Image (cartoon, rainbow, N blue to C red):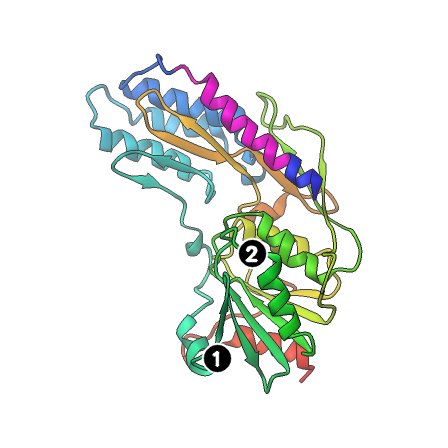
Amino acid sequence: MKNIIFLVLTVTALISCEEIMFDKDYTSTNPLDNFEYLWNECDRKYSYFELKNVDWNKVHEKYAAQLYEDMTEDSLFKVMRNMLLELKDGHVNLISDFNVSYFNIYGLGQDNFEPRVITDYYLPPNYYNTGPFSHEFIADKQVGYIRFSEFSGLVDDENLDFIIERYKDTKGLIIDIRENGGGDPMDFFNILGRFIEEKTLMYYSRLKNGAEHDNFTNDVPGYLKPYNGIRYTNKVIILTDRGTYSAGSFTSLATKALPNVILVGDTTGGGLGLPNGGQLPNGWNYRFSITQTLTLDKNNSYEKGVPPDIVALFDWTDLTTDEVIERALDEILER
């Protein structure tokens, strides 16, 4: 865990340094100045050009041709937004006082989650809410269902102790992180540490550190340590979809190294590059991915999405059943 904390702190330091190094006297509303500034920042620091197979020079040629001297701020924003959308990365944003650009990860696949089906057909009306978790027994109390909708930074030992103690005698747990767009990455360490018995290598990370697109630091291993207290050793199923992003994808990737944890659902939306940003000469802000996260065999392709161990898709012609939950129950109950 120290290694991943080191990497997060390094990125935080880079953000702080960038704010310090940014020349606040360098201001310009000229469209070309701002376009070139943003293009060059991405060119030097963005971490996934090669994986995304993006020819950034051709992107420059395409969008620079759309600039003109007296264009409005809105028109300039649209050109720069469209340039950034070429990266197809949910951690890439352009932020002005009138608009925010983002890549829609939900459009990568079908919608795979309908909360009303769960509350109507799987959970009783008085289900538990413990910290950031909603949870209850299902399948005749053989399984614990836990909904975790956001990595809010509110996961703590007290709420996890309560949940693990409550479901300690079940045959398995279902942790539903569908449409969880991410947040505090420390939450998933706290959660997954409850499901292992020994220190486990989960993945590697590296930081973009040079002008060339393939310039990176050495790979930093990310380890998970078992929680020193009550843990759960039966089968754990984590439900994912294309809306599972950022910290959700880190969680999904980490489970590949955990023998009693299985991913069920759809491929995640990706987001395994930690973002960093700055300010343009006209005062707009931007951010983009500056790290890569690698599998245990040093592959970075899961940035495009962590695949499930078992594919299960929601059937929208039947709103009385959640096929993803049912497939997880099949796995736990061996039915």
Counting from the top left corner in percent of width and height, residue 320 is at 43, 82
Decide: is 113 above or below 221. Answer: below
What residue is at 42 percent from the left and 30 percent from the top?
Answer: 59
Q: Nearer the viewer, residue 45 or 126?
A: 126
- Measured as percent of width and height from the top left, residue 281 is found at 34, 20
Q: Residue 123 carries which label?
A: 1
In the depicted structure, whether residue 39 falls above or below residue 154: above
Mark carried by residue 155: 2
Q: Residue furthest top?
A: 25
Check residue 226 in the rendering and tell me which mark sits there, or answer none. Answer: none
Amino acid at circle 2? Val
Q: What element carries label 2?
A: loop
Residue range in magenta is: 7-23
Tell me what residue is drawn at x 56 percent, y 58 percent. Answer: 267
Determine the residue positioned at 39% across, 25% down.
279
Q: In which quarter of the image is residue 319?
A: bottom left
SS category of the residue bearing label 1: loop
N-terminal label among 2 and 1: 1
Q: Which residue lies furthest to the bottom in this view?
A: 140
Residue 102: x and y, percent? 38, 43
Kindly identify the amino acid type of the residue bearing the numbered disc 1. Leu
Please, what is the dominant secondary structure of the magenta stretch? helix
CA separation in Å, label 2 and label 1: 22 Å
Q: Does residue 318 appear anywhere in the picture?
A: no
Q: Does the magenta stretch include residue 254?
A: no
